Image (cartoon, rainbow, N blue to C red):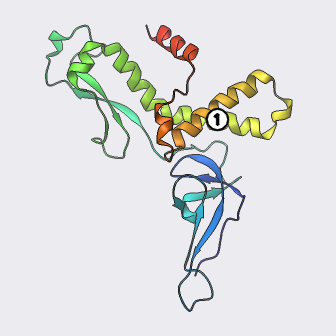
């Protein structure tokens, strides 16, 4: 038998997604003839129901704990199409970046060798961005948590940054809104600054 560990409108940390959410509905699963539910799931508005082991109550996370259980990282793959002496203009001749997004060393994101050869510095920057994205999302979430705690005493510039951070976080975590994928989250000025700094 199961008892609800969280209640409606309670703020919880959703471990698989790496974000804070609010319990919208408590969903007990009943079996005929039993007085208590056999399982309890929770709808936190993220597209699927979560079990109690996937949620953590506010205050249960220590401030020093890592927000994400995943460890995305960049490793180097051997370039089978070009010899190191043929690609001296590459930052790491004879290799290309692979973003590992799972526990094994073979799962993740790669680019074709021909695409890498067109602009290796750009692909290297993209690899650094992708492998750092979970940490960046964690920084956004910490900023939002900080603003939530004391929004009335913060300057408008910080509140504006928090609004942008919340838009980015919602865009990343909203799998139920396919139209959002075509919308630009970062405004044009920030995109131009990022391009200029990469050049």
Identify the residue at image location x=13%, y=22%.
Answer: 81
Relative horizontal placement of residue 10, taking residue 119 as reference (left or right): right
Identify the residue at image location x=62%, y=57%.
Answer: 56
Relative horizontal placement of residue 27, taking residue 58 as reference (left or right): left
**Corner quadrant of residue 145:** top right
Q: Position of residue 153 (x, y in %)?
A: 86, 30
**Corner quadrant of residue 156:** top right
Q: Is residue 64 above or below residue 153?
A: below
Q: Position of residue 186 (x, y in %)?
A: 55, 23
Specify the farthest residue to the bottom.
Answer: 33
In the rendered image, the quadrant that contains the N terminus is: bottom right
The residue wearing badge 1 is 166
Label 1 environment density (alpha carbons within 10 Å; few <14, some 14–19, many ≥20): some
**Corner quadrant of residue 90:** top left
In the rendered image, the quadrant that contains the C terminus is: top left
Q: Nearer the viewer, residue 166 or 128?
A: 166
Q: Is residue 46 above or below residue 179?
A: below
Q: Position of residue 95 (x, y in %)?
A: 24, 22
Identify the residue at image location x=31%, y=46%.
Answer: 104
Tag count in the figure? 1
Q: Is residue 160 above or below residue 194?
A: below
Q: Is residue 55 above or below residue 5?
A: above
Q: Position of residue 23 (x, y in %)?
A: 66, 58
Specify the farthest residue to the front.
Answer: 179
Specify the farthest residue to the right.
Answer: 153
Q: Secondary structure at mark 1?
A: helix
Relative horizontal placement of residue 80, taking residue 116 as reference (left or right): left
């Amino acid at each position: 038998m199961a008892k609800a560990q969280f209640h409606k409108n309670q703020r919880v940390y959703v471990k698989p997604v790496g974000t804070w959410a609010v319990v919208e509905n408590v969903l007990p699963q009943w079996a005929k003839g039993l007085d208590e539910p056999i399982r309890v799931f929770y709808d936190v508005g993220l597209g699927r129901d979560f079990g109690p082991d996937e949620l953590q109550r506010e205050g249960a996370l220590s401030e020093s704990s890592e927000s994400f259980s995943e460890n995305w990282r960049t490793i180097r793959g051997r370039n089978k199409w070009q010899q190191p002496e043929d690609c001296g203009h590459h930052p790491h001749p004879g290799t290309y970046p692979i973003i590992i997004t799972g526990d094994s060393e073979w799962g993740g994101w790669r680019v074709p060798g021909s695409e890498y050869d067109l602009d290796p510095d750009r692909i290297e920057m993209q690899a650094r961005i992708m492998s750092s994205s979970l940490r960046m999302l964690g920084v956004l979430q910490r900023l939002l948590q900080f603003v939530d705690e004391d929004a009335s005493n913060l300057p408008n510039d910080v509140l504006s940054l928090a609004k942008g951070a919340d838009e980015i976080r919602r865009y990343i975590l909203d799998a139920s809104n396919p139209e959002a994928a075509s919308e630009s989250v970062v405004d044009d000025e920030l995109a131009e600054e990022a391009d200029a700094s990469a050049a």
